[in-house]
Image (spheres, rainbow, N blue to C red):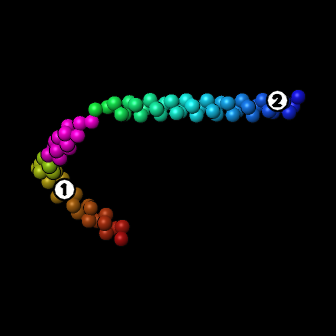
Amino acid sequence: MTEASEYDQSDLTRDLRQLALVDRIIGLEAEVARLSSRPVEPIAEIAEIERLHNELGAVYGSRAWRVGNSVLRPVRVIRRLGRS
């Protein structure tokens, strides 16, 4: 009886692993289908990158950024000297 229950246990373990793998494959296939059907709009992405680039330029050009940069410059120099 012990041998039969061990055999059944190994069959059960194998079957559960196989079902888990099949489930994973089905999920991955659904993900591929979802990503494949998504419209690709590189023009919109490029426009977003340009917008963010302009916004970052405005931040770097602002008075607050320049003042903060000037105030913190000595702190950065001291930190660099402390690391070496």
* Picture quarter with the N terminus: top right
Q: Name the disc covering residue 58, or none.
A: none
For disc 1, the marked residue is: 69
Estimate the x, y position of residue 3 in percent, counting from the top left: 86, 33
Q: Residue at x 14, y 54 (%)?
A: 66
Amino acid identity at mark 1: Asn
Residue span colored magenta: 40-56
Q: Is residue 8 above or below residue 80?
A: above
* Picture quarter with the C terminus: bottom left
Estimate the x, y position of residue 34 in percent, counting from the top left: 38, 30
Number of callouts in the render?
2
Assess whether mark 1 and mark 2 are in contact (beta carbons under 8 angstroms).
no
Q: Residue at x 34, y 30 (%)?
A: 37
Say what secondary structure mark 1 lies in.
helix
Question: Splitting the image into 4 quarters, where does residue 78 fall?
Answer: bottom left
Amino acid identity at mark 2: Ser
